[in-house]
Amino acid sequence: MRCPFCRADNDRVIDSRASQDSFSIRRRRECLGCKRRYTTYERVEELDIKIVKKDNVREPFHPEKIKRGLSLACWKRPISEAQIEAIVAAVESEIYSQYEGEVESRLIGEMVMQHLHAIDQVAYVRFASVYREFKDVRDFVDELQPMLKKYAPSVPKPSS
């Protein structure tokens, strides 16, 4: 491992521990040349999963895309970075345990929405509006209707 500061190829590991997602090992290292410390992560090399998009284009799976979408949906909501990371890790784990080779983007979106629904309903609706490509207010109402029935059964259904 080369030091990111002085590029020396001589370091020692100070501390090793499993990361929060339990799929990688976090190592604190000290460069023996410049004495600066830095962190590295060791991960198992995963299978190459391809995502099949709506237009049948295939592209490599990148968990950071899920995180980016979640971050936008959770903007100005009481959701911590750790919660977003936990959703990404859970979805990534589900994908690698359930699929081999290819997975449809639709299924990934459903997984994300399932996890997000349990944490924050506003962020869930935001994510759903982009993911399901809502065209108008009716699409929002249709998505909200099951939640309204569950939490406010006395609210009358809007007339068409």
Image (tube, rainbow, N blue to C red):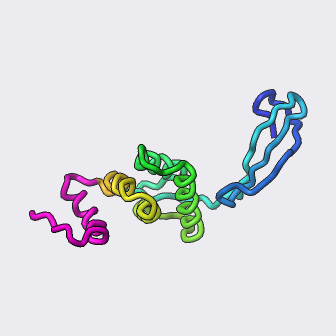
Q: Is residue 114 magenta?
A: no
Considering depth in this image, is 128 or 99 the residue closer to the camera?
Answer: 128
- Across and down, in percent, residue 152 comes to 26, 68
Image height of 135 relative to 94, above or below: above
The C terminus appears in which quarter of the rendering?
Answer: bottom left
The image quadrant of residue 5 is top right
Residue 134 percent coordinates (x, y)? 26, 54
Q: Is residue 97 left or right of residue 129?
A: right
Residue with the most extreme left position: 160
The residue at the point 53 percent across, 58 percent down is 87
The front one of 24 and 60 is: 24
Quarter-of-image position of residue 11: top right
**Which corner quadrant holds the N terminus?**
top right
- From the top left corner, tell me how far across and down residue 105 is, in percent: 43, 59
Q: Looking at the rendering, which quadrant does residue 98 occupy?
A: bottom right
Q: Is residue 56 visible?
A: no
Q: Nearer the viewer, residue 133 or 114?
A: 114
**Residue 90 visible in rendering:** yes
Pinpoint residue 25: horizontal percent, then vertical percent. 75, 54
Image side of residue 142 versus residue 121, left or right? left
Q: Is residue 104 left or right of residue 10?
A: left
Indicate yes or no whether the magenta region holds residue 149.
yes
The residue drawn where x is 35% and y is 52% is 126
Please give the range of residues in magenta.
134-160
Count the numbered circles shown.
Answer: 0
Which residue does the image show at 31% across and 68% down from the upper left?
Answer: 151
Residue at x-position 20% and y-position 67%: 155
